Image (cartoon, grey):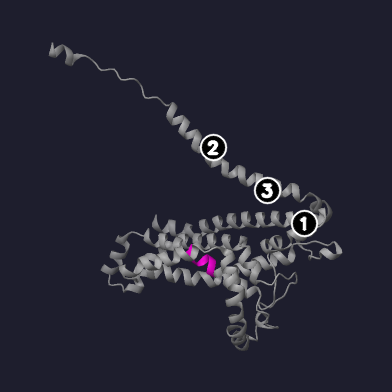
Amino acid sequence: MIAATAQRKVVLAPPSKAGDAFFKFLTWGMAMMVFVLVALLGWELFQGSKISLQQFGWRFLIHDWDPGNGNFGALPFIFGTFVSSLLGLMIALPLSLGTAIYLTELAPRWLRRPALSLIEMLAAIPSVILGLWGIYVLVPWLRDHPYPLLQKALAWLPVFRGHIYGQSFLSAAVIIAIMIVPIITSMAREVFRAVPDSQREAAFALGATRWEVTWLAVLKGSRRGMFGAAMLGLGRALGETMAVTMVIGNSTDISASLFAPGSTLASAIANQFSEAVDDTYRSALFELGLVLLLVTIVTNILAHLLVGAVSAPQDAFNA
């Protein structure tokens, strides 16, 4: 009896693939929803911009903004967006990378957790709070102390000439830098932590100092990640609205001086949307939003291409 039972073949039902197919379709739909949302956003901005597109065409990108005379153009806002964002990134990047290196490679364990908590807290502060602090505390201090010293030392450069207003491109760049430091720091720290400890140990075994280990084993192997972190910070800087609106001065003039007031695409929309009294004015603001969306998309595409170009030599070397 036992032998007969042992000789019976157990036939198992084939596994059902319906669950796998449903799960794949569900996750594919969630992924496609991102593209759908971006497409819908772009379509709505395009629909709202039709009047401005028909009236100004491509000249909208190179004209000044003068609502009083019915002339609308995005040039001063594009200029202000790139100047404040790139300058903010230049200020934030060294601070962020230095902080990330210290917390990953040098800081004692008892200091890492409090420092990370403070960085996360800084990232959680609403931009409007930073804007209020900037306009009442930071801007007056910058106007009375660092800016005159900076102008005295570097007055031979055109960007540091002219009257010091306080609310300016440089003040907006400082606020933007404060806002993107936690983002770049957190991403750069994760990139440095992903470097295998075996690379550090190999460098130490060859007699390298702590600085040489950090430079050769960590930083050189993390170029792609650091560049990606910088581009993520730049993407945040391009779209920042409330804090920048409060400290940049909201002027439609284009000036070579960083001490002059200006405006960005996002701040112009936030500051003037309630003043749009006619369809053309409102449509021009919609087109500013469309330009900002396109600038963000193009920046991200270029960032991915540059990341690939930066990482290609490294991948070839590793191969």
Q: Nearer the viewer, residue 139 or 60?
A: 139
- Judging depth in this view, the residue of 194 and 168 nearest the camera is 168
Name the image quarter holding residue 104. Answer: bottom left
Q: In the structure shown, which secondary structural element does the residue marked by tag 3 occupy?
A: helix
Residue indicated by mark 2: 29
Mark 1 touches mark 3? (CB < 8 Å): no
**Mark 1, other Cα within 10 Å: few <14 / some 14–19 / many ≥20:** many
Magenta highlight range: 178-184
Residue, x 79% and y 52% (percent of image)? 53
Label tally: 3
Labels 1 and 2: the sequence-earlier one: 2
Which residue was labeled with disc 3? 42
Predominant SS of the magenta segment: helix
- Does 159 appear in magenta? no
Q: Quadrant of the N terminus?
A: top left
The residue indicated by pointer 1 is 284
**Mark sitting earlier along the chain (3/2):** 2
Residue furthest toward the left?
2
Q: Tell me the distance, in whole angstroms, between the alpha carbons under discs 1 and 3.
A: 15 Å
Q: Is residue 213 visible?
A: no
Q: Amino acid at mark 1?
A: Ala
Give the x, y percent position of residue 112.
35, 67
